[in-house]
Amino acid sequence: MKLREVILCGLFIALITVGTFVRIPVGTDVYTLQFLFTLLAGLMLGARLGALAIGTYVLMGLVGIPVFASGGGPAYVLQPTFGYLVGFILQGWVTGALARRGVPTFRRALAACAAGMVVLYALGIPYFYFISNYIIDAPIGFWVAVWYCGVLQVLPDFLLCVAAAYAGIRLYKAGLWIRETQETQPRSTAPVQGAAVHANRMDV
C-alpha cells in the first residue's frame, strides 16, 4: 500500500469510529453518521481499500477496542446489531465497485450507495432476527424486524446515500479518490511515442 492509501484508510477508520458516537435525534429515533462514512469509504477508497478500512474498524472492535456503539470485544458477535457491522464491510466493497463502473457521476454514485444500503439490510436484518430469537431470547417476529429495522429506516438512510453521493462526487472532482489498478483510461488508436499515459481516477 502506498503512503497516501494508508493515510486515507486510517482517516476513514477514525471517521467511522467518530461517526458511531455522533448521535442525531430525529423524533423518537437516534441516528449516527457511521453509515455515511462507510459509504464514503467505499466511494473514495474503492472496493478493495474501502472494505479493508471498514474491516479493520470491525476487527479493532472485536479485539476489545471500544469503537462500537456499545463497546467492543469478541462477545459483540452476539449483539443483534453485529450483522450490520459485517454488512458495512460488504457494503463498502459493493459501493466502491459499482461507483467505478464507468466515469463517476452523481447518479452512478447514488445508485452504488443505494445498492450498498440494500446489501446492508440483507445482512443486518436477518442477523438481528436470528440473534434476537435464538441467542439472547428476545423474541421478535421476522416482519416486525423488517418493519423496524428496514422499512422505517429507508428514508433517513437514503438521505445519507444522497449526502454521500454528493460529497463523494465533489471529492472525485477535487482529485481525492484513490486509484484502483483495474481502472484504465480509454485506449487511443494512435501510436504513442515517448509519452507516458497517466490514469486520473480515485479510489472509494
Image (cartoon, rainbow, N blue to C red):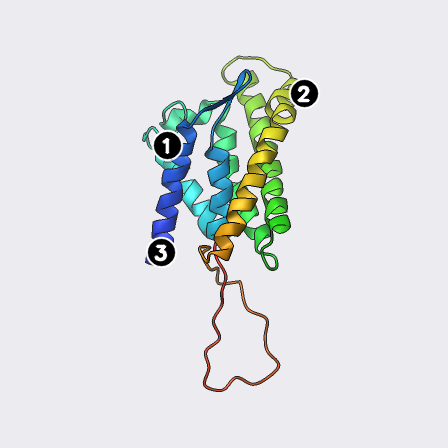
Tell me if label 3 and label 1 are in contact, CB under 8 Å: no
| 66 vs 193: above or below | above
Task: Report if residue 72 is visible in the image.
Answer: yes
Q: Amino acid at mark 2?
A: Trp
User: Which residue is painted at 38% across and 33% down in the image?
Assistant: 18
User: In the image, residue 157 lies at what x, y percent?
Assistant: 58, 32
Q: CA distance from mark 3 to mark 1?
A: 24 Å
Q: CA distance from mark 1 to mark 2?
A: 30 Å
Q: Decide which of tag 1 and tag 2 comes sooner along the chain.
A: 1
| 165 vs 84: above or below | below
Graded by Cα atoms within 10 Å as few (under 14), some (14 to 19) or many (20 or more), the crowding at tag 3 reads few
The quarter holding residue 145 reads top right
| 134 vs 188: above or below | above
Residue at image mark 2: 143
- Which residue is more in the foreground, 146 or 62? 146
Residue at image mark 1: 61
Label 3: element kind = helix
Label 2: element kind = helix
User: In the image, residue 186 lies at what x, y percent?
Assistant: 59, 71
User: Which residue is painted at 46% across and 60% down in the image?
Assistant: 179
User: In the image, residue 73 lies at what x, y percent?
Assistant: 35, 27
Q: Decide which of tag 3 and tag 2 comes sooner along the chain.
A: 3
Graded by Cα atoms within 10 Å as few (under 14), some (14 to 19) or many (20 or more), the crowding at tag 1 reads many
User: Which residue is painted at 48% across and 57% down in the image?
Assistant: 202
Graded by Cα atoms within 10 Å as few (under 14), some (14 to 19) or many (20 or more), the crowding at tag 2 reads few
Q: Which mark is residue 49?
A: none
Tell me if label 3 and label 2 are in contact, CB under 8 Å: no
Q: Decide which of tag 3 and tag 1 comes sooner along the chain.
A: 3
Q: Amino acid at mark 1?
A: Gly
Q: Which mark is residue 4?
A: 3
User: Which residue is painted at 33% across and 28% down in the image?
Assistant: 66
| 45 vs 29: above or below | below
